[in-house]
Amino acid sequence: MLVLGIDPGYAIVGWGVLRYDRNQYIPVDFGAITTDAGTDFSQRLNDVYDGIYRLCQRYRPDAAAVEKLFFTSNQKTVIGVAEARGVTRLALRQNNVPFFEYTPLQVKQAVVGYGRAVKAQVMEMTRLMLGLKEVPKPDDTADALAIAICHAHSSGSILGSLKQGGSVPGVHLSIREGI
């Protein structure tokens, strides 16, 4: 499975592509889409869209994993990031790439095994899991790789398969009406 992880934004969009095969995470490529602060905002959104679209065309991922929008401190940027997520989703949709969202807690749990891990722990575990010499920069790129790991980890589980509408051999799910 080829997964495109995305840490959304409009100034910096971290991205990472990894292959998940037989419980191994293999980094394919990673980087960041950046836009200049002085540029018209609609142009910045266009640049984000173009960047994601080109990544989809280049790598043909089986799925995209995007961090769920979660703001507690910087309320001023939430609308801009939401708009950037919108153009990201559009680029993915136009390339027929399934889109999955994960909260920061889910990413930390999947990568570190502890949902309250600090950023440095997540980055170092990401580096170790991918066999990289150093943590990718900028931080958004490392975050995107962690998000891709989270999706690969989740989609490889029985619950992840069922969540995605799939089936698991030997597992039968029945739902009784009225419950």
Image: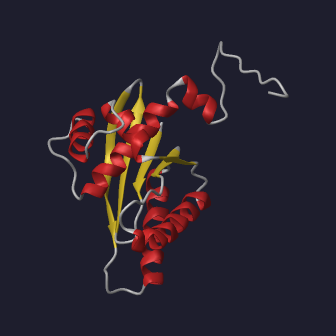
Q: Quadrant of residue 148?
A: top left
**Number of dots carrying numbers:** 0
Question: Position of 137 compared to 140: left or right?
Answer: left
The answer to whether any part of residue 61 appears in the image is: no
Point 42% across, 29% down: residue: 21
Compared to residue 159, the image places residue 56 above or below, namely below
Q: Nearer the viewer, residue 111 or 136?
A: 111
Pick out the residue farthest to the right.
Answer: 178
Task: Residue at the far left: name it.
Answer: 133
Q: Position of residue 122 (x, y in %)?
A: 27, 41
x then y, percent, for residue 81:
45, 68
**Where is 170 relative to 131, above or below?**
above
Of residues 24 and 164, the one drawn nearer to the viewer in this rendering: 164
**Coordinates of residue 127 in the picture (x, y in percent):** 22, 40
Residue drawn at 54 percent across, 63 percent down: 91
Vertical comparison of 94 with 35: above or below: above
Q: Is residue 167 toward the left or the right of residue 61 in the image?
A: right
Quadrant housing residue 43:
bottom left
In the picture, measured across the screen, residue 38 lies left or right of residue 75, that is left
**Nearer the observer, 146 or 96:** 146
Q: Residue at x 42, y 38 (%)?
A: 150
- Where is residue 51, by image quadrant? bottom left
Q: Residue furthest top?
A: 170
Question: In which quadrant is the C terminus drawn?
Answer: top right
Residue 13 spot, x, y in % from top left = 37, 63
Q: Residue at x 34, y 30 (%)?
A: 113
Q: Is residue 19 visible?
A: yes
